[in-house]
Structures are given as C-alpha cells and as structure tokens.
Image (spheres, rainbow, N blue to C red):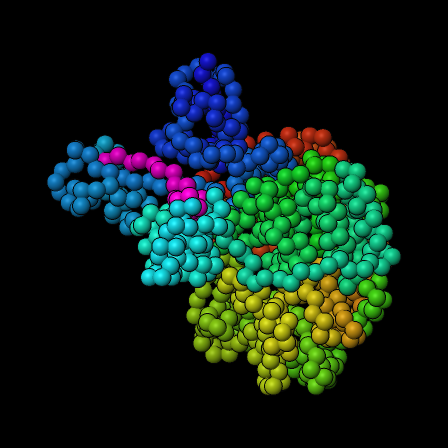
C-alpha cells in the first residue's frame, strides 16, 4: 500500500493551515518522518513544507502529487516541538507554518528562487531583448525594471517562456580540512626512519600520524602539534601517507575563554530557595516558582546551583534572559560554571552561529541553553529546569505573529517535561505576583542583598524647582552634577540612564508651532547628529535636517527634547576630562557591540556609562557607586495601563546597578512628578506596597490581572477601509459575547498611522467567555476574504493598548 505524507506547506493563509496529502515515492518509503522538511509541487510552483504525519489513506479522490525532494536526513522538529507548534497556533491565532518557522534558526528556513527560461516559441528579437546569452535568468519581480517585468509577463501569458521554482536550502555547515592516515602504524614507523635525516619535518609528520585516532583531526591542529607546515602536509598527501577530507566544525559564538568558577556559599534565604527548587527537579514536579529578590540578592547563584542539580540527574536546563544586552554577562557566568555544556541563542549571533548552536542543542552536545525570547523553542531534550530571569520584561512578548509570550511557552514546556519553571525578578509583573498570591505559584523571597550590603540611598530631584532656580532646560540637576564629580574624583564609575535614543526628540518651529513629522507615520521625526539626519524610529524614513520651517518658512525651527547623543555632547562639555561610553540602539547595531562596550566599562576604560533602558538590568560592575536617572517621567505620560508599573520596575532595576560590591551606592532620580506613587515607592524599593497600590488601580479600571484582554487591530492605507473593517468586527464580537464582556472601541490607535497604514483597534476585556475563541476564529477566517491590503491582527493578552 502506498504511503502518504501529510504536509503543512510554507504558504501562510487560512486555506493552507491544514496539511495537504502527497504521495511518498518508493525511494523514500519508510524513510520519511514527521518533522522533516520537504519540497512539494503546489499549484504551478514548488514550495517547501513540513511533514506532520504519515498515513496509508487519504480522503482525496484524485491523483496525489509526489513529494519532490527531502531536505533533511533527520527531523528538524521533534515530537514535542510539533505539538508545541499546534498549541501555539491555537492560542495566538497564528498559522501553523508561521509557528513552525518561528521555532527554527534562519538557515533552516528554505528560500524559494524562481527562474524564467526561453522556449522555442520566442522570436529572435524577443530572445535578444530578454535572453541575450540564451540562458535562463533569475525572476525576481522586485529587482526588475517595470518595462522588463511587463514584457516577461506578456511572454509568459503567451506561453513563450517557462517559470521554474527551485527551493534553496540555506542550511550549510562550516568545514575545515581534516587529516586521516592511510597507512598502518608499522609502515609509518619504517617511513619515518628512512626520511629522518634528509627530511626531518616529514619525519615529524610521520611520527605524529602514528598517534592519530581513527576519526579525522583538523589540519590546523596537526600543523600546531606536529610542528610542520601546510606544504609538508600536502607533500604527505601526494606520497599517499594521509588523506584530507572536509571536517565539520562549529562556529563558536564565545569570542573569549572564561575562567572556571565554583559554587558560592549561600545565605539562608538563597539556601531555602535552592532547596525548594531542587526538590521539584528531583521529583520531576511541574511546579512554578517566583523568586522575588531585590537587586543584588544573589538570584543568579540560586539559578546556577539549581541548574547543577538538574545536570547531576542527567537532565538539561534552559535559561532565558530578556535582551541581547544582558546575554554576554549572564552567558559568561553560566559558561564559567558549566563550560562546554553551554550553548547560547539570540539574534545578535550570525546566522551560521545560530544554526551551529541549534545543532549542538539538537544533538544533545549542549545541555544548558542561555538565550533571549526565541531560545524558549530550543530543541533541548530531557528538560529538568526552566529559568526565566527578569520575567517582568515586555521584550519576552513577541509583537508580530505568532504573538506569544515566552513565559506561557516556558510553562507549557515545563508541563510537558514534568519539570519546574523558575520566574525571577526584583519587580515581578503584576500577573505573576497575583498568581503567587493565589497560591498558583510558589513564592521564594530574597529580601536583602548578599552579605547584608545595604540598598543604595535614593534621592528624588524635583526638576520643577531645578528649572526655576537655574532658568534653563538642562538635563543635569545641580545635586546630580555634584555627585558625578565626586565619583570622578574618587575614580569610581557612574551609570546614567536616559529613557529614549537619538539626539533630540523633535524639531518644532517657534513661530507657528509646526512639528516635523514622518510622511508615513503619525509621529515626529527624531534628530540624529551622526549622521546628521532626521529619522523615523517606526518605519526608518530619513530626510535632511530642515534649515527653515516647511510650513511658514521661518528660520526659528529648533530641536526640542533630549536624546542620548545630545546628553553625551552636553556632558562632555560639562566634564571634559570624563571618559564617556554611550550605549543605545544606534551604538550597538554591529555584531558584538554590546559585549565590547560592557567589557570596556568593566575594565574601567570609561568613567560614565550613558544609555537607554538596556543598561538598567542585569549589569554587575563593582566600581559603580552612582546611578542617575535623567528623565524618570518619560513612560508615565504614555496612554498605557502598565505605565506606572513599567516606571516603577525600570527605576528599581536601574537603581540596583549602584553599590553592588563593598562601596556604598547612591541614586539620583530626576523627575517632574516627584509625588507620583511609582516614583515615591521606587525610592524605597518597596515592591509589596507598589503591588497593593497598583492592584487597586487595576481593579478600579477593570484591567489585567483582574480581567483577561484581547486586542483586535485592522490596518489599511485607506483610513476609511480600516475603520469600516473594525466596525464589522465589532458587530461580530458583540453578537458572540456575553454582556459581561467589556468592549472598547473602535478607536484609532495611539499612533494612528505607521508605514503609510492607518490602524484602528477594538479591545475586549473579559473574565470568562466560552464562545470567545470561536468568535475570534471566525474573524480570522473572514479576514482572509477581506479587501486587498487590509490586515487584521489578534493579540491575546497584549502588553499595552497603544
């Protein structure tokens, strides 16, 4: 009986969200497995896809098309990840193929290339115009000029050319020359004796080959260990002593070796936390822990000693950190404890490095994985422990399909592997802390720093008074400048955080009030001094800095606001002898820039680290005794129900960078809202009081965690089309839900236009709606038949409503 493969094709539409049946050729019978990548004919083209099942029958009555090729020797998706993809598609309202692709490194995402070839039907003139060399040419409509594209399309309609599709597998391994011997040891000994006097280097090579193992050894190692040159090895190959063959090597993302470390002595609170976690690891209990520890309380050591327990039991561990900026320091700490067992996964690696680390994990060669959000999909086997550091961070939520939260995926995998999940933070998200309060999570508290080091003294600077006294819009208050100078005099280090990037917020005309905005988005352009351009931080639009107002032609157009480049320039003028490092999105674009800047600061090659939010978390430098927050209010003014929570978390986290070693720390928070409870409670790092206060505010406003939430968005280049679509969606929502659900909108989003598209939204808040999933599935299905260019997205549990 013929075997049939069920294949999810790489065409993300509702029509292709279920598998298609393909005949398995006899040559592949009993070899194909679920999780393998294949290429299949689909319509008039060839596409890649994933085998999700093997059957002996099908409901399709016609002639099945056969699978064209297999791209893998073994499945790239194991059984767990296949099940996870299905769960993810259901809970995030995304296509199955999108979820599958999200789990894989970029080099495992096959690329379809098209070629257009001439036929005998072409006239000589057409052949000379479009195929001057008589050969097929690549057919990429985005790279062809309109005239050529139009001509080729007409030829295709006339049947004078053919288009072929080739699926190019980008997964390539890195190789280096490898050496194996071709002769027995006794013969190598005889040869070494005979050539010893006239060719000592050849004799050295022959002696080395006698000790060579059966498997290939890298040529570079042979050259180093035997003390010979590549020319000598080539001579040996010519004489038949050895043969060279490609040897697969991994691309190593660790640039420098790290010194090994040993477990530290735990205090009573750390010991209690490790004991509780280890018990769950040993008992294979899918238990969720919240490690709520103040900054500097030793959470990382708790993680490391818990990982060690999992490894001793023959299991593996997964550790998530929220951002690339945190990965180098955390990875080095884990690597120094567990050595070659550690693999790292994050977007800062090259595609080749990602692919090689993924394969090390898949092959079981790495049993500890450290990485950012997408590392939660690592193909790690026998999981014994999952750790999610800084679990409150919004970067754990993906803002494009599939819109998953890494915490939810981690909890799913914890249930699958019967292993504990540890959520760690000094300032847990309200959702996590509320679940701990209900007893759904086990709360482990570390409420004082290691060795009872005091928390830093926090000063709140009222910038309203500062501006009155100094009659300017300077970024630095007098108390902060005095404190910075004191640290420079004592050769200590300073961290300054500014809650935005770029040189200046916007340009405004003082005569008519005109603000220079992006032509594609409803947002002002930001001035960047290097290069000197106005840039949009949403769509990437750039334009020259205007000399006159485009509206009234006045020359009184000026920069307003503050950015990291502007602050760096001002700070250098105020403190000309200070060595300043700037760390923001612009200065860390290049691969390895995060680690390079942090190493510079760690070596005390700079006195002041000036940066955006990326410097607020996870950094541990013993010589930092002062932290300054230049504008604590930035997030408070946003139309976001989590604005107060994010402000409190950020201020608490960045304050924790000061005084982490023997020297005491101080923090200066500059604010125009000194009486706001988020700022007042951040001063004392009183998370528990903030939790109670903020939960009261959420309860009054019917916001999470008291309610679940779903955000529906429609976007189109025509504002009317987007608005009409949202009103139709609103009607479907109200028909399917109970009167207990709270439906807000439709309204334009806070930034109503981005990349030439208008955005409208509806927000649903609910506690229990059994028909909600069916309603949302119906909306998603209907959106596939919507007007051209209309996009409808569904975001379950959005991080904000902006």
* Picture layout, residue 227 above or below residue 669: above
The reply to whether the magenta stretch includes residue 182 is yes
Please report the residue visible at 77 percent of the width from the left and 54 percent of the height from the top.
Answer: 302
* Picture layout, residue 53 above or below residue 395: above
* Coordinates of residue 200 in the picture (x, y in percent): 38, 61
Q: How many marks?
A: 0
- Most foreground residue, 296 or 119: 296
The magenta-colored residue range is: 161-185
* Coordinates of residue 712 in the picture (x, y in percent): 61, 42
- How would you classify the magenta stretch by its main secondary structure? strand
Which quadrant would residue 119 be assigned to in this image?
A: top left
* Picture layout, residue 207 above or below residue 118: below
Q: Is residue 728 visible?
A: no
* Coordinates of residue 100 in the picture (x, y in percent): 54, 38
**In the image, farthest residue toward the right:** 268
The reply to whether the magenta stretch includes residue 295 is no
* Coordinates of residue 117 in the picture (x, y in percent): 24, 38
Please report the residue visible at 38 percent of the width from the left and 38 percent of the height from the top.
Answer: 167
Please report the residue visible at 45 percent of the width from the left and 50 percent of the height from the top.
Answer: 210
**Drawn side of residue 422 relative to residue 169, left or right:** right
Which quadrant would residue 26 be assigned to in this image?
A: top left
- Most foreground residue, 611 or 697: 611
Q: Is residue 656 visible?
A: yes
**Drawn side of residue 118 relative to residue 757, left or right:** left
**Drawn side of residue 551 relative to residue 562, left or right:** left
Please report the residue visible at 83 percent of the width from the left and 46 percent of the height from the top.
Answer: 276
């Amino acid at each position: 009986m013929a075997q049939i493969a069920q294949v999810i094709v790489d065409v993300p539409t509702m029509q292709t969200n279920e598998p298609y049946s393909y005949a398995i050729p006899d040559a592949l019978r009993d070899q194909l497995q679920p999780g393998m990548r294949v290429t299949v004919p689909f319509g008039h083209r060839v596409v890649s896809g994933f085998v999700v099942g093997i059957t002996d029958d099908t409901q399709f009555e016609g002639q099945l098309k056969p699978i064209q090729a297999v791209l893998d020797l073994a499945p790239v998706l194991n059984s767990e990840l296949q099940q996870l993809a299905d769960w993810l598609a259901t809970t995030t309202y995304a296509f199955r193929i999108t979820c599958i692709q999200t789990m894989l490194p970029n080099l495992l995402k096959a690329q379809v290339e098209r070629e257009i070839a001439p036929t005998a039907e072409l006239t000589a003139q057409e052949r000379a115009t479009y195929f001057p060399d008589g050969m097929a040419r690549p057919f990429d409509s985005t790279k062809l000029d309109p005239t050529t594209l139009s001509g080729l399309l007409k030829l295709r309609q006339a049947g004078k050319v053919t288009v072929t599709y080739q699926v190019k597998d980008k997964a390539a391994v890195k190789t280096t020359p490898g050496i194996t011997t071709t002769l027995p040891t006794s013969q190598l000994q005889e040869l070494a004796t005979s050539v010893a006097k006239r060719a000592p280097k050849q004799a050295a090579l022959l002696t080395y080959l006698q000790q060579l193992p059966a498997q290939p050894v890298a040529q570079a190692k042979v050259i180093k260990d035997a003390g010979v040159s590549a020319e000598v090895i080539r001579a040996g190959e010519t004489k038949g002593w050895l043969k060279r063959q490609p040897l697969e090597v991994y691309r190593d993302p660790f640039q420098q070796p790290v010194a090994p470390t040993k477990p530290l002595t735990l205090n009573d609170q750390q010991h209690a936390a490790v004991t509780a976690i280890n018990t769950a690891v040993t008992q294979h209990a899918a238990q969720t822990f919240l490690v709520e520890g103040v900054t500097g309380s030793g959470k990382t050591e708790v993680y490391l000693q818990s990982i060690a327990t999992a490894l001793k039991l023959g299991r593996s561990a997964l550790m998530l950190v929220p951002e690339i900026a945190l990965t180098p320091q955390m990875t080095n700490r884990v690597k120094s404890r567990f050595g070659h067992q550690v693999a790292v996964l994050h977007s800062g690696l090259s595609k080749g490095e990602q692919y090689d680390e993924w394969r090390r994990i898949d092959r079981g060669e790495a049993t500890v994985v450290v990485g950012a959000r997408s590392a939660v999909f690592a193909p790690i086997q026998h999981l014994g422990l999952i750790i999610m550091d800084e679990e409150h961070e919004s970067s754990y939520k993906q803002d494009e399909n599939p819109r998953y939260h890494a915490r939810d995926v981690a909890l799913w995998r914890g249930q699958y592997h019967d292993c504990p999940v540890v959520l760690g933070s000094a300032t847990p998200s309200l959702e996590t802390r509320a679940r701990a309060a209900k007893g759904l999570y086990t709360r482990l508290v570390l409420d004082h720093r290691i060795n009872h080091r005091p928390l830093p003294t926090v000063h709140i600077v009222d910038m309203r008074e500062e501006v009155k006294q100094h009659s300017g819009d300077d970024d630095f208050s007098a108390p902060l400048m005095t404190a910075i100078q004191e640290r420079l005099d004592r050769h200590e280090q300073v961290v300054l955080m500014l809650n935005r990037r770029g040189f200046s917020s916007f340009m405004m005309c003082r005569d008519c009030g005109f603000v220079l905005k992006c032509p594609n988005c409803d947002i002002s352009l930001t001035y960047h001094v290097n290069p000197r351009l106005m840039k949009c931080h949403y769509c990437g639009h750039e334009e020259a800095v205007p000399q006159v107002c485009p509206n009234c032609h006045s020359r009184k157009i000026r920069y307003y606001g503050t950015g990291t480049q502007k602050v760096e320039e001002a700070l250098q003028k105020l403190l000309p002898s200070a060595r300043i490092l700037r760390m923001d999105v612009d200065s860390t674009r290049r691969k390895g820039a995060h680690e390079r800047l942090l190493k510079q600061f760690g070596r005390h090659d700079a006195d002041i680290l000036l940066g955006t939010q990326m410097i607020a978390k996870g950094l541990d430098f013993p010589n930092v005794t002062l932290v300054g927050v230049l504008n604590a209010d930035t997030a408070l003014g946003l139309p976001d129900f989590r604005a107060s929570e994010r402000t409190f978390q950020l201020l608490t986290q960045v304050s924790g960078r000061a005084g982490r070693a023997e020297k005491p720390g101080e923090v200066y928070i500059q604010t125009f809202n000194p009486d706001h409870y988020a700022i007042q409670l951040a001063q004392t790092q009183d998370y528990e009081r903030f939790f109670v206060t903020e939960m009261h505010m959420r309860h009054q406003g019917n916001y999470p965690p008291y309610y679940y939430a779903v955000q529906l968005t429609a976007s189109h280049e025509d504002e009317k089309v987007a608005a009409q679509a949202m009103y139709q969606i609103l009607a479907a929502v109200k028909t399917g839900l109970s009167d207990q659900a709270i439906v807000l909108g439709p309204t334009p989003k806070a930034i109503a236009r981005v990349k030439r598209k208008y955005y409208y939204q509806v927000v649903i808040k609910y506690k229990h709606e059994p028909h909600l999933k069916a309603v949302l599935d119906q909306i998603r299905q209907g959106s596939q038949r919507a007007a051209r260019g209309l996009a409808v997205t569904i975001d379950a549990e959005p991080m904000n409503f902006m």
